[in-house]
Image (cartoon, helix red, strand yellow):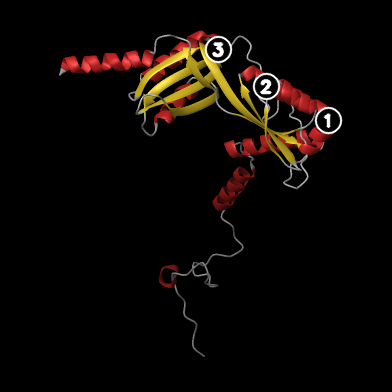
Amino acid sequence: MEQEKKYGAAECGDCNTCPRNCNGQNDNEIDPAQEALDAAVLAAAAIDRNSYEKNLYRERAATLAEDEKASGYHERFSKNAVVAPATPGKEGSLLNQSHAGLTLYTLIIYSENYAGILNQITAVFTRRQVNIESLNVCASSTPGVHKYTITCYCKREMAEMLVKQIEKKIDVLQANCFVDDEIFILETSLLKLSTPSVLADKEISRIVRRFDARIVEVNPTFTTVEKTGITDDILEFFRCLNDLGCVLQFVRSGRIAITKSCVEHLDQYLTQREEDSQKTM
């Protein structure tokens, strides 16, 4: 019988699967340093560290659990629509938030039509921890110029600071801030109502007529109602219908606004810039 050959660790090169103990070590012996390292790794992995994803998951789970506990409602996509009245202070209501000492300002911004400008503008609000309530972007009457209508709750000093910082952007032509008395404003909203509730309660139809809303679509499951007006009227319209427990969905558009001034500041600015460019030529 051939004598068994012995190989060193460097000669074999397969120490992970080889059953031989080439270095003369006992398999039962455990390196204390390795054991301490393994224990430290396991202890670190066992810690439930906070992260953005985990905190967001906990917050959503807590909100869902509280909503189910309060009303027993869980949204399902089925033929029969289920009514879920909005709960003040929860996600999606946004109607009873406290803005004590703050004023709602509307910022109207004009800029060149280039990609990435919206990100630059919203970054100004993010750096100063100012929440944007609504945002509307559209083409203006001036070719190549876009108009941004942004609303936020803040103090006068903060609104003026936001305007100055936004105007420093290269592609921004002009920025101004206004209160509600200085501009004409308009918003559009859509409400999805439960058709069985609308047919059973005549008060719902009276509220729709009283607020001069328009019924867009009616089917056996839901009724779609459109309401256009100022912010206070739209919110009051929603509160009246929501108190009757017939609202399935509610959505509002961003605010659109024009100034009450007799002078168009953007046209003045563009005219002045054109004259200055001709003088330098």
Eyeballing the image, is 261 above or below 7?
above
Q: Quadrant of residue 269?
A: top left
Number of the label disc, if any, that sits on residue 201: 1
- Between the C-alphas of marks 1 and 2, the distance is 21 Å
- Would residue 148 appear left or right of 88 to someone viewing this image? left
Eyeballing the image, is 75 above or below 279?
below
- Between the C-alphas of marks 3 and 2, the distance is 16 Å
Would you say residue 129 is visible in this rendering?
no
Provide residue 195's location: percent of width, then percent of height: 77, 37
Q: Which residue is mark 3?
A: 180
Provide residue 81's location: percent of width, then percent of height: 76, 41
Seen from this angle, which residue lies furthest right? Answer: 200
Q: How many residues crowd around disc 3 within 10 Å: few (fewer than 14), some, or many (20 or more)? A: few
Nearest to the eye among marks 1 and 3: give it.
1
What's the amino acid at mark 1?
Answer: Asp
What's the amino acid at mark 2?
Answer: Leu
Q: How many residues crowd around disc 2 within 10 Å: few (fewer than 14), some, or many (20 or more)? A: some
Labels 3 and 2: the sequence-earlier one = 3
What's the amino acid at mark 3?
Answer: Asp
SS for dot 3: helix
Q: Which residue is mark 2?
A: 235
SS for dot 1: loop
The residue at the point 47 percent across, 70 percent down is 14
Q: Nearer the viewer, residue 91 or 139?
A: 139
Q: Are marks 1 and 2 in contact (CB under 8 Å)?
A: no
The residue at the point 35 percent across, 27 percent down is 143
